[in-house]
Amino acid sequence: MTCAPQLEDGHTRIANEILEALLLARLTSRQWSVVMAIIRKTYGYQKKTDDIGLGQLSDLTGLGKPHLSVAVRELEERRIISRKQGKFGHIMGLNKDHTQWIEVERKSAKGVTESVTVTETVTVTDSVKRGYQIGKAGVTELVTTKENPTKEKQKKEPREEMTFKKWIEKCKLEGKQAIPEDDPVFAYAEEVGLPLEFVRYAWVEFRRKYLSIEYQGKKYKSWTQHFANAVRKNWAGIWYSKNNEFLLTTSGKMLEIEMNKNREAA
């Protein structure tokens, strides 16, 4: 049987200007798949936004949920898509004002392509004000919208016992990531299917706990290993497993709402 798709059977309308902006956005293959899936779920049904779960995106793209979680966050940080808490997942949609997109090549009036890169560095004092960069870029105490930071060889973590605060300060002084991109915790999360966004929530709670008055005196030789244990054993009680899928607990959902609200207010 010949496959002959017809517009009459359904089609998605998108302005050429937006399509051309997407072509200049230097998206990764995963980011491109996610953007197209969001467009299909919104413009494909004559809607600006839709309540979309990672399961739906996975069905459309064939990508695993951990990779989808990272790609969605990256697109949101670049302001290419909008996202807020929904009933079934997140209410997402394409940001039509492509002049707000970050790290996009733009065509000048004379037809010359000029590269526009916006790097926004914010020192975070509130543990949930902007969240933390976490995933393939590791965890840092600086929030940056530049997609591909220069990779530097990570120094081995000192084996002397120190408090969490002193360790974070040492990481900042040495210009290294608190949880480097090759840390085993990310491989573990991908292996068991734990969304990287959940690992991000675990980091926020972990940081908040060990900067609190009650635990600020705790000392460990390896805070990266201690955090890995916190994720593996779900010490903060942020998620639970059901039908081979990780879901947020009530505490986890409250944390997600808190972070989304602060992200929108930033």
Image (tube, helix red, strand yellow):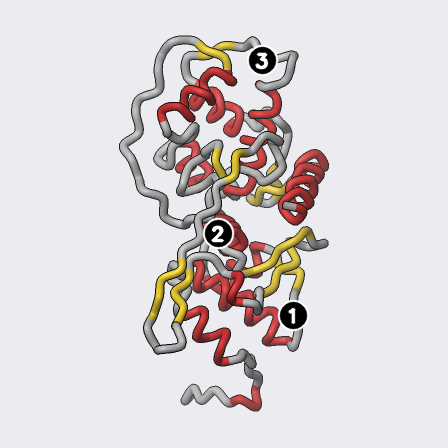
Type of amino acid at the residue the image marks with label 2: Glu
Q: Residue most toward the front?
A: 110
Real-space Cα distance between discs 3 and 1?
46 Å
Instruction: Look at mark 1 in the image and give the residue it sits on.
Output: 48
Instruction: Look at mark 2 in the image and give the residue it sits on.
Output: 74
Instruction: Look at mark 3 in the image and give the residue it sits on.
Output: 216
> Considering only vertical position in the picture, is 171 above or below 105?
above
Does dot 2 land on a helix, a strand or a loop? helix
- Residue in the image at 43% along x and 9% along y: 161
> Considering only vertical position in the picture, is 46 above or below 122?
below
Marks 2/1 in contact by CB < 8 Å: the verdict is no
Q: Earlier in the sequence, mark 3 or mark 1?
A: 1
Q: Name the quadrant of the C terminus.
A: top right
- Residue in the image at 40% along x and 41% along y: 137
- Residue in the image at 47% along x and 75% along y: 19
Give the percent coordinates (x, y) of residue 88.
68, 55
Give the percent coordinates (x, y) of residue 5.
48, 87
Does dot 1 land on a helix, a strand or a loop? loop
Type of amino acid at the residue the image marks with label 3: Gln
Q: Earlier in the sequence, mark 2 or mark 1?
A: 1
- Residue in the image at 58% along x and 64% along y: 95
Type of amino acid at the residue the image marks with label 1: Lys
